[in-house]
């Protein structure tokens, strides 16, 4: 049984009936409490001269004491096995058991040292469970735990052997929690890998079965080319490279052999690629009225766009930004490289992105385009180049090959990905 010194009368009603051999005391009955003292800069160093100087919460991390200052003129000492408690300032309540033979502690630190048979780890876990209550008793503008609050703390104290058993049980539970956290990390990594695999299957025609009755993609492609030719003749878009020239500039070996009914086509043969811009922020008449305008920072990782500003018609006319129609696909090619989004309304955008506007909207399903481009951008990111920022050029985007299935299959693929992603995102939500 623990050797208990004469106890201070303590209200034990909140503990209920104690087990045989247990006692209740104030912390002052079983510990010595040492308050720290700050040193002036001329009395400490970073050259490892003297003994460690523990300055505050930043020195207590994950139950360990970190040392980055030393002093040759110590005054308030902590020794090996003391429980160090942050009592003032940011990080109040942080604790660690000292592994240092001798150290000077600053005024933000108290050293708790038992002088009878009390397990220091048992004290640490007991105080950790109540540290919120201790902080609530503090007063003043700066968060702090006063000496009397610590000394008056009511401690339920079992025999020493039982203290050790309780500590062992707590640490075994913490070990399980650590394993669960690791498993969560593994599961999160697994979810990310699963999403990548789903996309890989989708863009190679292996996610959903083919339907022989679907109109083949070659017919879609001919229709797109015809519409592109009409747009060029009408002067609505500029002529670009011939499809054959473009298709030979990009390796599509990572896609493998596509299913019957699919086609490969350069992105530049399917979409008009339009850049963005930013009106001068010095001209107030260009901003905050008119069309929504977004930068890459307004696109989250799921492809949702939340514009924070809008631009006036005058701002559009006096900049390189463009108004792009709903359902166009946005690809971030500079800052924020790799983000992809589908417009839910007409918008303008910054120079960090390119908009892909289908030459023939009836032949391409925007959600399928989104998923293919997201997959393709992960590949292009590895070949990103630039002087001050990582990015890809418009030519790289134009030359990238696009796996084109029948329109009906595009919809089946996108719908399947949506369902599978929702399941995976629910798993991620649950493990968080």
Image: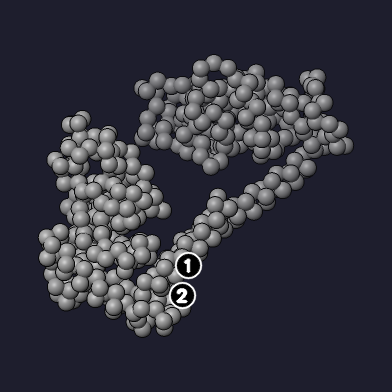
SS at circle 2? loop
Quadrant for the N terminus, please. top right
User: As drawn, is 393 to the left or to the right of 101?
Assistant: left
Which x, y percent locates residue 49?
Answer: 40, 33
Question: Residue at horizontal 77%, vertical 32%?
Answer: 156
Kindly indicate whether the residue at mark 2 contacts the one at mark 1 (C-beta within 8 angstroms). Answer: yes
Seen from the viewer's position, the closer of residues 133 and 63 is 133
Outermost residue toward the top in this view:
140
* 24 w.r.t. 158: above or below: above
> Could you tell me residue 113's position as x and y percent?
64, 30
**Picture layout, residue 124 above or below residue 210:** above
* Residue in front for this viewpoint, 66 or 189: 189
Residue 258 higher or lower than 143, as above or below: below
Residue at (47%, 38%) from the top-left corner? 66
Q: Is residue 291 visible?
A: yes
* Residue bearing mark 2: 208
Alpha carbon of mark 1 to alpha carbon of mark 2: how far? 8 Å
Which quadrant would residue 216 be assigned to in this image? bottom left
In the image, residue 162 lies at what x, y percent? 78, 42
Picture coordinates of residue 63, whole percent (x, y): 56, 41
Instruction: Classify 10 Å Cα crowding around label 1: few (below 14), some (14-19), many (20 and above).
Output: some
Q: Which residue carries the number 1 mark?
A: 416
Question: Quick check: can you spot residue 76?
Answer: no
Q: Secondary structure at mark 1?
A: helix
Q: Earlier in the sequence, mark 1 or mark 2?
A: 2
């Amino acid at each position: 049984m623990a050797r208990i010194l004469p106890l201070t009368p303590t209200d034990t009603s909140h503990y209920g009936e104690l087990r045989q051999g247990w006692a209740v005391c104030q912390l002052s009955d079983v510990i010595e409490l040492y308050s720290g003292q700050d040193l002036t800069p001329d009395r400490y160093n970073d050259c490892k001269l003297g003994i460690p100087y523990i300055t505050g919460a930043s020195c207590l991390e994950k139950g360990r004491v970190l040392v980055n200052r030393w002093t040759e003129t110590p005054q308030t000492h902590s020794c090996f096995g003391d429980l160090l408690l942050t009592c003032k300032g940011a990080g109040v309540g942080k604790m660690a058991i000292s592994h240092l033979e001798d150290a000077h502690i600053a005024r933000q630190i108290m050293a708790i040292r038992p002088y009878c048979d009390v397990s220091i780890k048992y004290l640490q876990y007991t105080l950790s469970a109540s540290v919120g209550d201790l902080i609530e008793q503090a007063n003043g503008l700066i968060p702090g735990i006063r000496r009397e609050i610590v000394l008056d703390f009511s401690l339920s104290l079992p025999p020493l052997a039982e203290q050790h058993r309780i500590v062992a049980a707590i640490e075994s539970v913490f070990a399980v929690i650590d394993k669960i956290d690791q498993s969560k990390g593994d599961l999160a990594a697994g979810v990310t890998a699963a999403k990548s695999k789903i996309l890989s299957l989708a863009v190679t025609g292996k996610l959903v079965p083919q339907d022989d009755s679907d109109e083949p993609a070659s017919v879609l492609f001919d229709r797109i080319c015809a519409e592109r030719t009409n747009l060029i003749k009408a002067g609505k878009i500029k002529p670009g490279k011939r499809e054959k020239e473009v298709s030979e500039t990009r390796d599509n070996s990572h896609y493998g052999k596509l299913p019957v009914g699919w086609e490969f086509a350069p992105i530049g043969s399917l979409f008009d690629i339009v850049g963005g811009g930013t009106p001068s922020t010095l001209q107030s008449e260009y901003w905050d009225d008119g069309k929504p305008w977004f930068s890459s920072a307004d696109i989250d990782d799921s492809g949702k766009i939340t514009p924070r500003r809008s631009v006036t018609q005058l701002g559009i006319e006096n900049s390189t930004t463009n108004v792009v129609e709903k359902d166009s696909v946005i690809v971030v090619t500079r800052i924020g490289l790799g983000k992809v989004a589908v417009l839910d309304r007409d918008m303008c955008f910054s120079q960090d992105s390119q908009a892909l506007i289908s030459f023939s909207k009836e032949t391409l399903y925007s959600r399928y385009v989104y998923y293919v481009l997201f997959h393709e951008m992960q590949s292009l990111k590895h070949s990103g180049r630039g002087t001050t920022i990582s990015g890809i050029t418009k030519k790289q985007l134009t030359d990238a090959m696009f796996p084109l299935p029948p329109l009906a299959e595009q919809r089946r693929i996108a719908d399947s990905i949506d369902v599978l992603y929702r399941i995976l995102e629910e798993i991620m939500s649950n493990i968080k």
